[in-house]
Image (cartoon, grey):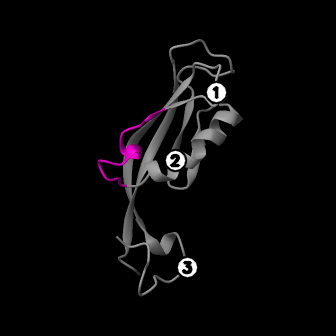
């Protein structure tokens, strides 16, 4: 068993009010959680497919430790992709887990990893 581990944060994405009325079908407070690679939607509450599509690229970086000067470490409120809609989505870290590399891949770690800092 490998002792190679990394940290992932669990996230909560929640619909909040912006400075304009909602145009889309968003509901304040509706959202979902991201735990590991899985999305857990709020039971019985809708969440816009288009908003989800806009948020998805931001979630994996938000799950990882970030440099304090990286904009991803400070910008947590995301606008609805519809430019006429006032909805916003707040991304919050709600937990932390240590993940074993062996549980996520069968690919061996390269000797000269170009991604290592």
Question: Can you tell which quarter of the image residue 93 is in?
Answer: top left
Circle 1 residue: 45
Q: Residue 14 in the image: state x and y as whole percent.
A: 51, 30
**Residue 35, visible in the rendered structure:** no
| Circles 2 and 1 in contact, beta carbons < 8 Å | no
Mainly helix, strand or loop, the magenta region? loop
Taking the image as shown, residue 18 lies to the left or right of residue 70, namely: right
**Mark 2 or 1, closer to the camera:** 2
Circle 3 residue: 106
Q: CA distance from mark 1 to mark 3?
A: 37 Å
Per the rendering, the mark at residue 110 is none
Q: Residue 110 in the image: state x and y as whole percent.
A: 46, 84
Residue at x 41%, y 55% (from the top left corner): 64
In what element is the residue under mark 2? helix
Residue at x 41%, y 45% (from the top left corner): 72
In what element is the residue under mark 1? loop
Residue at x 50%, y 14% (from the top left corner): 19
Q: Residue 18 in the image: state x and y as whole percent.
A: 51, 18
Per the rendering, the mark at residue 59 is 2
Report the quarter where the N terminus lies. Answer: bottom left
In what element is the residue under mark 3? loop
Q: CA distance from mark 2 to mark 3?
A: 23 Å
Report the quarter where the C terminus lies. Answer: bottom left
**Part of the protein shown in magenta:** 65-77
Decide: is 51 above or below 106.
Answer: above
**Mark 2 or 3, closer to the camera:** 2
């Amino acid at each position: 068993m490998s002792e190679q581990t990394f940290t992932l944060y669990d996230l909560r994405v929640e619909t909040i009010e912006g400075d304009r009325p909602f145009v889309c079908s968003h509901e304040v407070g509706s959202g979902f959680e991201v735990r590991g690679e899985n999305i857990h939607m709020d039971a019985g509450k809708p969440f816009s497919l288009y908003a989800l599509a806009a948020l998805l690229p931001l979630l994996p970086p938000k799950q990882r430790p970030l440099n304090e000067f990286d904009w991803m470490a400070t910008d947590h409120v995301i606008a609805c992709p519809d430019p006429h809609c006032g909805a916003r989505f707040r991304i919050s870290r709600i937990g932390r887990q240590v993940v074993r590399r062996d549980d996520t891949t069968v690919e061996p770690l390269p000797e000269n990893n170009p991604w290592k800092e």
